[in-house]
């Protein structure tokens, strides 16, 4: 298992550095061969060299790695986030990662949220008229292709069905944004026909947000266009108890290489203070192991996170742990489970 690691900026570097020992330990316990190579793509390099995503990066990742772990991008010295778009959106588009899975394990049940990840308002189509520093017209086009929406829906509905969920909701805004809205609704109805187990419905995104906050138990599977999915996932993270808890997997339905990153950003307000929550990043490692077919170590990481969370947590979730203090709990829980579970694992092998 070869893993490319892009710590990025701000707390991205802190949570990745904190989480990687959990990968080492779980690999040791389950006898997995996991090698990690780090890439310094981020704000410092951009400011030093002007390079965001280096030339050939996408081809290198495809050729040499099984998965990518990314911390976060975003730096106050680059207020327009030009480097972040180049690297993050460049990877999502370059690797054709059109599905972004952001599971929300809420007390009312898990919402399997799937966000389209490469198109819509993120397609990078647009421009300005007039002086660049004071344009008279500014345009960002919302672009969707039949092929990508179809691949996204087919894969996401399949995953929602495989997760044992019955209800699925398409989130859209077809009343105000009719062209892409119509395409999404047409393809949703067509793709749903292949999933008789699923009971499909659709909602306007504004009403969806209202209901999500008041009654999250109403939702099981959710499929959403790019920007709506971005916004919904932060609301969902708030319902979970904080952004530090929400993880994501960016997937190409036609390839094995996938990218895993927490839902949160580089949190400049707490960067450098040693209290960033590494929970979501460890959960990303579990999603990564699941994706690569290593279910038992993924479950072990999730169990260790739950045990650590029951005993403590970082300040964002109401605890007093530092980043490293919380990871000490996670690693101890992993070792503890291992000692208890060992005889059974040996038999299973
Ligand atoms: P943010 O997600 O970085 O932070 C929002 C709030 O949540 C902050 O108060 C922060 O302290 C808190 N928070 C987030 N993650 C946390 C964690 N792990 N532990 C404890 N608290 C945590 O959003 P923002 O402040 O709007 O964005 C900061 C920068 O990150 C911006 O440059 C933005 O563009 C970028 N960003 C990047 C990504 C990404 O790389 N995937 C995602 C979102 C935002
Ligand atoms: C996320 C982030 C990114 C997005 C930004 C940083 C471009 O908010 O991963 O949720 O909008 O996708
Ligand atoms: Mn976001």
Image (cartoon, rainbow, N blue to C red):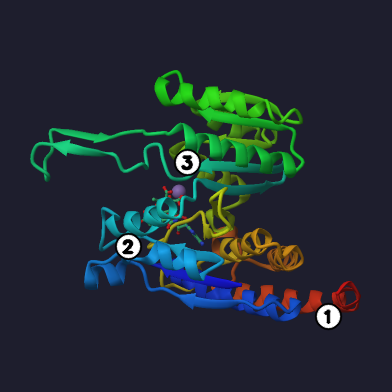
Q: Residue at 30% across / 71% down in the picture?
A: 44
> Of label 2 and label 1, which has the lower sequence position?
2
Q: Position of residue 99 (x, y in %)?
A: 53, 46
Q: Is mark 3 within 8 Å of ligand 3?
A: yes
Residue hosting label 1: 339
132 horizontally vs 17: left or right: left
Q: Residue at 88% across / 72% down in the picture?
A: 348
Question: For the residue labelled by badge 3, is the local secondary structure a helix, a strand or a loop?
Answer: helix
The answer to whether the residues at label 1 and label 3 have Cβ atoms under 8 Å apart is no
Q: Position of residue 307 (x, y in %)?
A: 74, 66
The answer to whether the residues at label 3 and label 2 have Cβ atoms under 8 Å apart is no
Per the model, the C-alpha gap separating discs 1 and 3 is 42 Å
The quadrant where residue 127 appears = top left
The answer to whether the residues at label 2 and label 1 have Cβ atoms under 8 Å apart is no
Q: Which of 37 and 171 is in front in this view?
A: 37
Relative height, residue 61 to residue 102 (above, below): below
Q: Does the residue labelled 2 lie within 8 Å of ligand 1?
A: yes
Q: Residue 75 carries which label?
A: 2
Question: For the residue labelled by badge 1, is the local secondary structure a helix, a strand or a loop?
Answer: helix
Per the model, the C-alpha gap separating discs 3 and 2 is 20 Å
Residue hosting label 3: 231
Q: Which mark is residue 65?
A: none
Q: Residue at 59% across / 71% down in the picture?
A: 321
Single out the residue that lies furthest toward the top. Answer: 175
Q: Residue at 65% across / 43% down in the picture?
A: 112
Q: Where is residue 3 in the image (x, y as percent from the top left)?
A: 54, 71
């Amino acid at each position: 298992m070869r893993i490319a690691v892009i710590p990025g900026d701000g707390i991205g570097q802190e949570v990745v550095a904190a989480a990687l020992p959990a990968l080492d330990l779980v690999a040791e316990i389950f006898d997995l061969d996991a090698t990690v190579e780090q890439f310094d793509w981020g704000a410092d390099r951009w400011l030093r060299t002007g390079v965001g995503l280096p030339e050939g990066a996408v081809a290198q990742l495809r050729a040499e790695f099984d998965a990518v772990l990314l911390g976060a991008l975003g730096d106050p010295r680059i207020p327009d986030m030009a480097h972040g778009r180049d690297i993050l959106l460049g990877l999502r588009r370059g690797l054709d990662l059109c599905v972004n899975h952001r599971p929300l394990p809420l007390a009312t049940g898990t919402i399997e949220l799937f966000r389209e990840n490469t198109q819509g308002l993120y397609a990078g189509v647009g421009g300005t008229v007039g002086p660049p520093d004071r344009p008279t017209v500014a345009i960002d086009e919302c672009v969707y292709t039949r092929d990508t929406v179809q691949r996204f829906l087919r894969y996401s509905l399949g995953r929602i069905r495989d997760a044992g969920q019955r209800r699925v909701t398409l989130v859209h805004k077809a009343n105000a944004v009719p062209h892409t809205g119509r395409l999404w609704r047409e393809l949703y109805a067509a793709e749903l026909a292949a999933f008789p187990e699923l009971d499909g419905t659709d909602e306007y995104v504004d009403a969806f947000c209202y209901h999500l906050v008041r009654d999250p138990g109403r939702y099981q599977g959710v499929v959403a266009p790019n920007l709506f999915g971005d916004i919904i996932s932060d609301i969902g993270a708030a319902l979970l108890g904080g952004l530090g808890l929400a993880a994501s997997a960016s997937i190409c339905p036609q390839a094995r290489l996938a990218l895993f990153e927490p839902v949160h950003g580089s949190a400049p307000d707490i960067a450098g203070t040693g209290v960033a929550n590494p929970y979501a990043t460890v959960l990303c490692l579990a999603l990564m192991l699941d994706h690569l077919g290593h279910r038992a170590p993924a479950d072990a990481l999730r169990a260790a996170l739950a045990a650590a969370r029951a005993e403590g947590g970082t300040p964002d979730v109401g605890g007093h742990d530092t980043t490293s203090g919380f990871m000490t709990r996670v690693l101890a829980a992993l070792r503890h489970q291992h000692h208890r579970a060992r005889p059974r694992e040996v038999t299973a092998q």
